[in-house]
Image (tube, rainbow, N blue to C red):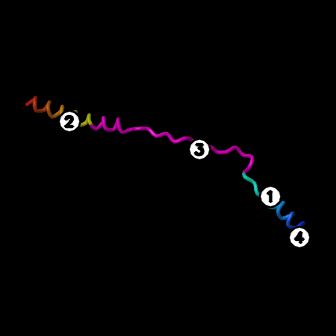
Amino acid sequence: MKKLVLAAAMAAAASTATAGNMEEPVMEAPVVVEETTASSSAAGVWVPLVLLAIVAAVVAAD
């Protein structure tokens, strides 16, 4: 009798323990990292050059 109860308990535990369901697995999109250091440093050079050109034009006009 004990073996029958033990076998029934094992069968119940084995039937409820599943690894997943029948749905499609959800895949996350890959992460894309872009380098932006070159464009930001180039933009930082143009602003002082334009200001220097404006100051040079004002000094030359006087």
Residue 5: x percent and y percent? 88, 67
Q: Which residue is mark 3?
A: 28
Q: Are marks 4 and 1 in contact (CB under 8 Å)?
A: no
Give the amino acid at mark 1.
Answer: Ala
Which callout, 4 or 1, points to the residue nearer the camera?
A: 4
Label annotation for residue 51: 2
Residue lying furthest left: 62
Residue at image position (14%, 32%) is 56
* Residue 61 position (above or below residue 34): above
Q: Which residue is mark 1?
A: 14
Q: CA distance from mark 2 to mark 4?
A: 93 Å
Give the magenta-colored segment's residue range: 20-44
Q: Is residue 7 left or right of residue 51?
A: right
- Dominant secondary structure of the magenta stretch? loop
Which callout, 4 or 3, points to the residue nearer the camera?
A: 4
Residue 18: x percent and y percent? 75, 54
The N terminus sits in image quarter: bottom right
Label annotation for residue 2: 4
Say whether residue 59 is magenta: no
Q: CA distance from mark 4 to mark 1?
A: 18 Å
Residue at image position (38%, 38%) is 36
Give the amino acid at mark 3.
Answer: Glu
Determine whether the residue tagged by mark 2 lies in a helix, strand or loop.
helix
* Residue 14 position (above or below residue 48): below
